[in-house]
């Protein structure tokens, strides 16, 4: 401090403070890069999960579509009192599926 109570800043202390701030900024950058790497790993995992779910849904839709094509209206036979009743309902998959 100077004689009148003001803080004296020397070139050396100024350079030390700048170096300290640079070190802090570098540390923050390193931490953020680590967070980004962890997030990229999580993101890749979620993309893989989504891909598997889409493939599963498409396969189920394909199977249900083929099964719906196999189920038709029952053929009425003369004298037949027992028939198979089929109807289309909305199921949990969100599509219209056949029940009998």
Image (tube, rainbow, N blue to C red):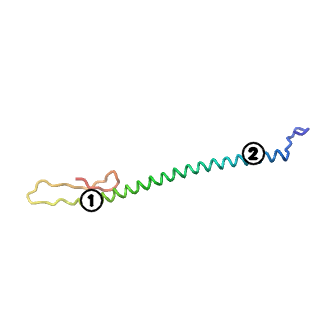
Viewer-proximal residue among 23 and 73? 23
Pointer 2 residue: 20
State which tag comes first along the sequence, 2 or 1.
2
Q: Are circles 2 and 1 on residues that touch, CB within 8 Å?
A: no
At x 69% / y 49%, what residue is drawn? 26
Q: Residue furthest right?
A: 3
How packed is label 1: few (under 14 Cα within 10 Å), some, or many (20 or more)? some
> Circle 2 — which element?
helix
Disc ID at residue 36: none
Q: CA distance from mark 2 to mark 1?
A: 71 Å
Q: Is residue 74 left or right of residue 33?
A: left
Q: Which residue is mark 1?
A: 68
Residue 3 place in picture, x, y as percent: 91, 38
Is 2 or 50 nearer to us in this picture?
50
In the image, is 55 to the left or to the right of 26?
left
Q: Residue at x 57, y 51 (%)?
A: 37
Residue at position x 73%, y 49% from top?
22
Residue 63 % position (x, y): 31, 58
Element under label 1? helix
């Amino acid at each position: 401090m100077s004689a009148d109570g003001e803080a004296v800043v020397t070139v050396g202390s100024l350079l030390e403070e700048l170096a300290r701030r640079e070190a802090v900024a570098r540390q923050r950058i390193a931490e953020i890069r680590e967070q980004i790497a962890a997030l990229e790993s999580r993101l890749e995992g979620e993309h893989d999960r989504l891909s598997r779910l889409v493939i599963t849904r498409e396969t189920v839709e394909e199977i249900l579509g083929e099964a719906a094509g196999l189920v038709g209206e029952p053929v009425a036979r003369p004298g037949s009192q027992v028939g198979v009743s089929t109807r289309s309902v909305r199921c949990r998959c969100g599509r219209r599926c056949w029940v009998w």
